[in-house]
Image: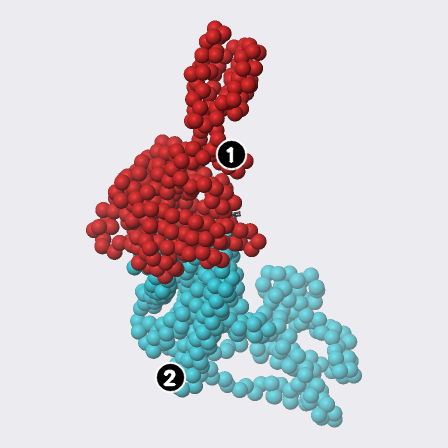
Chain colours: A red, B cyan
Amino acid sequence: MVIRVRDLVKRYGNLTALDHLDLDVQAGEIFGLLGPNGSGKTTAIHCILSLLTFEQGTIDVFDCEMTPDAYELKQNIGVVMQNVAVFDELTVYDNIDYFCGLYISDKAKRKQLVQEAIDLVALNDFVKFYPKKLSGGLLRRLNIACGIAHQPRLIIMDEPTVAVDPQSRNNILEGIKKLNQAGATILYTSHYMEEVEQICSRIMILDKGRVIRTGTKEELKATISLGEKITIEVENLPSHILENIKTNPHIATFDYDDHVLVARFIRGENGLVDLLELMNSSHLQLGRVYSELPTLNDVFLELTGKELRD
Amino acid sequence: MQVFKAYLQIIRKNSGLLIMYLGIVVALAIMMSQLNQPNQQMGFVSSRVNIALVDRTTQSNHALINGLHDYLADKNTIVMIEDDNQALKDALFYGKIEYALIIPETFQNEFDQKNSAQLETMSNPGSMASIYLNMQVNKYLNTFKFYQMGYPNKSQIELAHLTLANLRLNTPVVVQNKPSIRGSYENVSYYFNYLAYALLSILIIGISTCMLTFNNLDLKRRNLCSPMTLKSMNLQLIAGNLVFSLFSWFVFIVISLLIYATKMFSINGLLYGLNSLCFMFVSLALSFLIGISLKNRNAQSAVSNVLALGMSFIAGVFVPQAIIGQTVLRFARLTPTYWYVLANNEIGTLTNLSKANLQVIFSAMGVQFVFIAIFFLVAGFVIYRKRQQN
Ligand SMILES: Nc1ncnc2c1ncn2[C@@H]1O[C@H](COP(=O)(O)OP(=O)(O)OP(=O)(O)O)[C@@H](O)[C@H]1O
Ligand SMILES: [Mg+2]
């Protein structure tokens, strides 16, 4: 086990930021910690890194107890913090070199690693820039490069792609996958479900410091009652068809508004064919028809009664 | 060595501001040495002043006033101007005379009967000559009065003779001072006094900038995630502070060597160097204290200005300590700058290495070390408090 957290309780005064949290990250996986703002993702990561003291619980990294002076463990960990932590007085290159140098003292090797990190986040054109001159997204990319340049066995990333444009975000996500393929285990927090779905092999959903559910994205989606969501554009839906839909036991909810029918099926029921046949029998003119699988947002919505995004 | 390296990089990024302070000191020191060409006139020579004397008394017995006339004529040049206020004013205005003394009609009577008698004078505003002449007039009249009271039976003429004879006695005064020493180190003292302002400003800004950077919560956390031990990080920061301070001091010494050349290769030069090294440690300790107390950079320049400029003003960096008021100086004693400047001035006038002379200098340096200890103790306390809060 790369990270093993048991019964972790962290309080800020009266507020319980982490409420008996258990977490296991296995070697080789990209583990996603998904939760809305204030759910305790950052707090969990700070506890894992021994940056915070906590009320209760145990934390092991690489099967050793994590403590503030577990320097040998830290040697193998790369960190990308939610708040960008770089030196304003150092250039992009010098910043990456500084942080890489905290782990790698051999100069030649470091030079190579720094270059690889620059390539990974595509900052080649900006190596001489000072952080103040970088846009928000570029700064995030620098922050990532500083965290991963020494190619650690475990990489902990706390919302590393906030404010990064979709193009660069994809580059970064691809980069993270590459790091993972090269052998790094990754703990990744985000409140972007698409991101987590795209790269994480296992996902933990966190809310108010409590674990809501853990599993692969398929497993998570399988735990909820909702299945696919079908959208059909249709002019003037006759009332007998609406009645038919209303009484269909496989449809959980539906809505017809502005010539668009949205029907949510119960999980496990493939309703698309039935629904289309029903429409056909009445010779209705159909516009676009599409079907969507449930998202993690649906999972979150059903489990907590609220949207993942504010 | 990453932290140490980054420390120096941060300093280099801020070097523009630091060099500016260096420039201020060098410019001030050079300006002062131009203004302060050593004064060659060592003794005191009374200079003659053109004056007018208008006698409006009508009595026949003129011995008192004649004596005054003779006495003033001895020391000044009496210019004849007609007895007319406008004419006297014109003469003053055109510089024919610098001072006019008008003896009113009633003067003789008042002088004989009362203890005070009024004289009228005219001079240009702020004139030094008027002060000097008033002194001469008063001196004559007081001496005359003194004899008059001592010898109530003597005639006015006799009294005037006695008075003049007395006043014409001159005591020769010789100002003893080796001209080669006095003045020659004055400019060096100016330079090293200004150094107190610049070095303190430079160290406060440089050190507090680095401390603020490394104490920034996000960067600190990030550093704490690395395998670098806390001890190693602190040692590197200390090394950075020390190297930066020593380097700044060294630059000032090199510049002093360039400006004053051979003067610096002397005992005085050595003492200046030693004293400024003491002050460097004072500045280092104070900057360290400020660096860990400051929360962000907003207050940084305000603190550096208030402390460096404020202490410099009250402790006699820009204005000689000799002309600063006693109350202010009493406050100034509570600043390390005062003792640094005191030692500098002492070094500047040092002519021989007597035990007494050196003792003043070394005890002033000792007081600076007390300040160093106090600053570090307070800093330690601040760190301790911060740790407890976290
Ligand atoms: N230093 C602190 N003092 C008091 N409360 C805190 C502190 N840090 C975090 N909290 C609280 O703890 C809870 C969890 O915060 P945390 O930063 O871990 O959330 P998060 O999941 O990382 O949120 P985000 O997505 O916004 O980064 C929040 O309610 C927050 O207000
Ligand atoms: Mg967070």
Residue displayed at 25% across by 47% down = A113
User: In the image, what residue type sits under mark 1?
Assistant: Glu
Q: Position of residue A148 (x, y in %)?
A: 31, 46
How dense is the environment of label 2, judged by Cα within 10 Å: few (below 14), some, or many (20 and up)?
few
Q: Nearer the viewer, residue A169 or B41?
A: A169
Q: Position of residue B276 (x, y in %)?
A: 39, 71
Where on the picture, by quarter, is residue B63?
bottom right
Q: Give the residue number, with chain letter if any, for mark 2.
A: B353
User: In the image, what residue type sits under mark 2?
Assistant: Leu
Which callout, 2 or 1, points to the residue nearer the camera?
A: 1
Residue displayed at 65% across by 82% down = B140
Under circle 1, the secondary element is: helix
Under circle 2, the secondary element is: loop
Please indicate, yes or no, whether residue B200 appears anywhere in the rendered image.
Answer: no
Q: Give the residue number, with chain letter if any, for mark 1.
A: A302
- Mark 2 within 8 Å of ligand 1, using the beta carbon: no
Where on the picture, by quarter, is residue B280?
bottom left
Residue B387 got which mark? none
